[in-house]
Image (cartoon, rainbow, N blue to C red):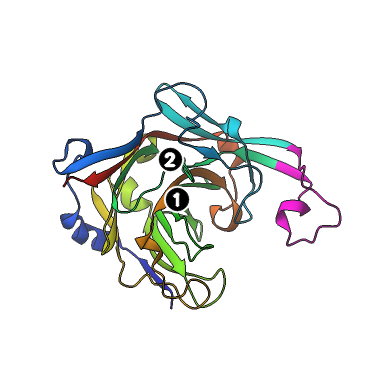
C-alpha cells in the first residue's frame, strides 16, 4: 500500500513548532564524521565523489558528464546546459521504450555525483547548504541510497527534490522502499507547494537554504531551514515480497547523491530561455551523536 501525503501550509505551520532550531555545527552532543566544504577549486574531490555518466534514469533529458560539476569560490556548482551532440548510444534499431538508445541526439548536459564505495553512514544527522534552480524542467536533488539489494528494496531517502506536479512547483521530502512487485516502490512522500516558501520570502530562490536529516533506528526527520517537512516512521518501512522481503532498508548504511536532472518522468518541460541552470552546494556535513 502506497503512503503519500500532501502537507498544507496550515499543517506545516502546526508542525513547525516541533522543528529543530539548532545550528548543527554549534550543537552540543554531535560529532562531525564527514564533510566536504568544496573549498578547493576544480573538480569535486575524487577521494569523496564518483561521477555518473550518460543517460542514467527516469527518461531524463540530460547527459551526465563530469565537466558540468566544478568547485569554485567555496561552492560546488552543478550546471545544466542546453548543448546538442550526437548520442553515442544511439541505434536505429532500438525500440522506442529503450530511451537511452533511441534518442539520436543529446539535448542538454548536467552532472550527478555520489559517494558510493567512498563514504556511507548509518544513523546520524546530515546537513546540506544549497541554492537550487527553480525554472520549469529543473529537478535538483539531495538523496541517499542503500548499499544492499536493487532499487527500491535498497531504500531511498530524498532529503530534497524540487519539481513541478501538475505544472505547480513543489519541494519534496521522501522515502521509498520495496513493494509487492519488482521496481514498485512504496512511498512516504511529503509534497509542499513552493508557494509555501515564496509567500514568506519572494527572493527565496536567490538564497542558500539549509536541508537537515535526523536519522535514528526509529525515524527519519527531514527539515528545511529548521521547519519539519516529513517524519518517516521506520517501523513501517519494511520491504514487501518483490525483493528482500521483510528487510528494512533504512537500518543499513546509505551513500549520498547530488544531481541536477532535467525533464524526464517528473521534471516537466524545460524553459530553455533560463539555461544554463546552476545548482550550488556550499557544504555537505554528516554527524553522529557523541557518546
Percent of width and height locating residue 256: 43, 46
Answer yes or no: do the residues labelled 2 and 1 have beta carbons within 8 Å? yes
Q: Main secondary structure of the magenta part?
A: loop
Image: magenta residue range: 85-106
Percent of width and height locating residue 32: 26, 38
Instruction: Please say if 250 is above or below 68.
Output: below
Q: Residue 95 carries which label?
A: none
Res. 101 visible in picture: yes
Residue at image location 41% in from the left, 53% down from the top: 254
Residue 50 drawn in magenta: no
Instruction: Please say if 98 is above or below 82.
Output: below
SS of the residue under disc 1:
strand
Percent of width and height locating residue 130: 38, 38
Residue at image location 57% in from the left, 32% down from the top: 68
Quarter placement of the N terminus: bottom left
Residue at image location 46% in from the left, 40% down from the top: 133
Amino acid at each position: 500500500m502506497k503512503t503519500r501525503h500532501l502537507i498544507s501550509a496550515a499543517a506545516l505551520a502546526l508542525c513547525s513548532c516541533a522543528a529543530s532550531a539548532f545550528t548543527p555545527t554549534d550543537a552540543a552532543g554531535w560529532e562531525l564524521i564527514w564533510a566536504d566544504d568544496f573549498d578547493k577549486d576544480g573538480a569535486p574531490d575524487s577521494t569523496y565523489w564518483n561521477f555518473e555518466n550518460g543517460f542514467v534514469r527516469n527518461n531524463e533529458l540530460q547527459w551526465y558528464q563530469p565537466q558540468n560539476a566544478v568547485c569554485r569560490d567555496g561552492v560546488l556548482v552543478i550546471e545544466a546546459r542546453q548543448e546538442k551532440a550526437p548520442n553515442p548510444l544511439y541505434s536505429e534499431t532500438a525500440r522506442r521504450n529503450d530511451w537511452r538508445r533511441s534518442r539520436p541526439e543529446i539535448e542538454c548536459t548536467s552532472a550527478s555525483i555520489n559517494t558510493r564505495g567512498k563514504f556511507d553512514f548509518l544513523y546520524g544527522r546530515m546537513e546540506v547548504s544549497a541554492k537550487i534552480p527553480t525554472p520549469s524542467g529543473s529537478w535538483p536533488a539531495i538523496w541517499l541510497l542503500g548499499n544492499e539489494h536493487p532499487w527500491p528494496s535498497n531504500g531511498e531517502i530524498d532529503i530534497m527534490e524540487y519539481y513541478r506536479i501538475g505544472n505547480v512547483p513543489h519541494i519534496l521530502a521522501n522515502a521509498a522502499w520495496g513493494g509487492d512487485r519488482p521496481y514498485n516502490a512504496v512511498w512516504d512522500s511529503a509534497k509542499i507547494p513552493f508557494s509555501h516558501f515564496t509567500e514568506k520570502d519572494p527572493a527565496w530562490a536567490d538564497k542558500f537554504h539549509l536541508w537537515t536529516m535526523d536519522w535514528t533506528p526509529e525515524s527519519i526527520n527531514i527539515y528545511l531551514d529548521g521547519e519539519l517537512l516529513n517524519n518517516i516512521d521506520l517501523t513501517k518501512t519494511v520491504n514487501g515480497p518483490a525483493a528482500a522481503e521483510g528487510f528494512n532498508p533504512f537500518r543499513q548504511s546509505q551513500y549520498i547523491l547530488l544531481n541536477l536532472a532535467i525533464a524526464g518522468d517528473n521534471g516537466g518541460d524545460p524553459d530553455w530561455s533560463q539555461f544554463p541552470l546552476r545548482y550550488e552546494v556550499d557544504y555537505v556535513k554528516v554527524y553522529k551523536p557523541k557518546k
